[in-house]
Image (cartoon, rainbow, N blue to C red):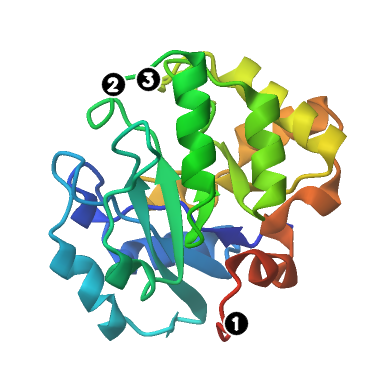
Amino acid sequence: MNIIDLHTHTVSSGHAYSTLEENVKGALRKGIQILGMSDHAGSLPGAPHVFHFHNLKIIPEYIEGVRVLKGIEANIIDYKGTIDVEDELLDKLDYVIASLHPPVITPGNLEENTDTLIKTIQIPQVKIIGHPDDGRYPIDYERVVKAAKAHDTLLEINNASLTPSGTRQGTVENSRRILELCKEHQVSVILGSDSHISYSIGDFDKCLSLIKEVDFPKELIVNNDIHKLKKYLKKDLDF
């Protein structure tokens, strides 16, 4: 059973529709025991002010029995792999997802995009690369998978990406390729709902269909094991 969902958004992201309290209730409905808050960092239009993230400390660690981890979805802002989160804040967060978003960075060519992701993977506080499946950013997935393995960084299989109404391109084929390479090189992945409303918290149905199709090993999925998650977060978190 998958009990972890770290890629979720609240109304603070500007284009999401549920509060943290509503997301917790969504987590309870789906059996999610560890819920991550990963609102968008400041470069994305509508994102919250940096004060939002510095004030995450006031949120209880447990809400209605659900462990709440305080993270961020950072934006990769240049081909050097730079993210839009200051070092002081990075060290305060429980985890960091880093993603490519077209409103923030114009897609480059295959080599530029691949080098960019690899440089971001090398940032110690970045624990997850969000939706690396977007065909608008051509990627050499074998190089990225090998870099993720070398730096203990998780690649995300994103349920929202695999939804037919999604705006990302080539996501099914690209996610399949990522899974096949992760299986070959024994690299773990994390499933993310990328929920922007409480009703989709813990939704991994599209991810699980693809995982079944490629016969991806259960032991390489982080969402079903708290101890695996702790290994990748590398923080002394109580859960």
- Outermost residue toward the front in this view: 80
Question: Foreground mark, 3 or 2?
Answer: 2
Image marks 3 and 2: residues in contact by CB distance under 8 Å? no
Q: Which amino acid does label 1 sit on?
A: Phe
Residue at image position (55%, 45%) is 203
Q: Is residue 213 left or right of residue 226?
A: right
Q: Which of marks 2 and 1 is in front?
A: 2
Quarter of the picture containing the C terminus is: bottom right
* Rendered location of residue 48, percent (x, y): 16, 56
* Precedes in sequence: disc 1 or disc 3: 3
First in sequence: mark 2 or mark 1? Answer: 2
Position of residue 215 measured from the top left corner of the image (x, y, whole percent): 87, 32
Horizontal arrangement in the rendering, residue 135 relative to residue 179 (left or right): left
Q: Residue at coordinates 49% horizontally, 41% vertically from top-left?
A: 119
Q: Which residue is tagged 1?
A: 239
The quadrant in which the N terminus is found is bottom right
The amino acid at mark 3 is Thr
Front position in the image: 78 or 232: 78
Residue at the location (73% across, 48% down)?
188
In space, the residues marked 3 and 2 are separated at their CA atoms by: 15 Å
Please tell me whether mark 2 sits on a helix, a strand or a loop.
loop
Tell me where residue 194 appears, x and y as whole percent: 44, 44
Q: Quickly name the residue at label 2.
A: 106
Residue 228: quadrant of the picture:
bottom right
Question: Which residue is found at the position 24% from the left and 32% from the top?
Answer: 104
Residue 160 appears in the picture as rendered: no
**Residue named by callout 3:** 167
**Label 2 neighbour load within 10 Å: few <14, some 14-19, many 20+:** some
Toward the viewer: 96 or 194? Answer: 96
Q: Image check: 189 left or right of 118?
A: right
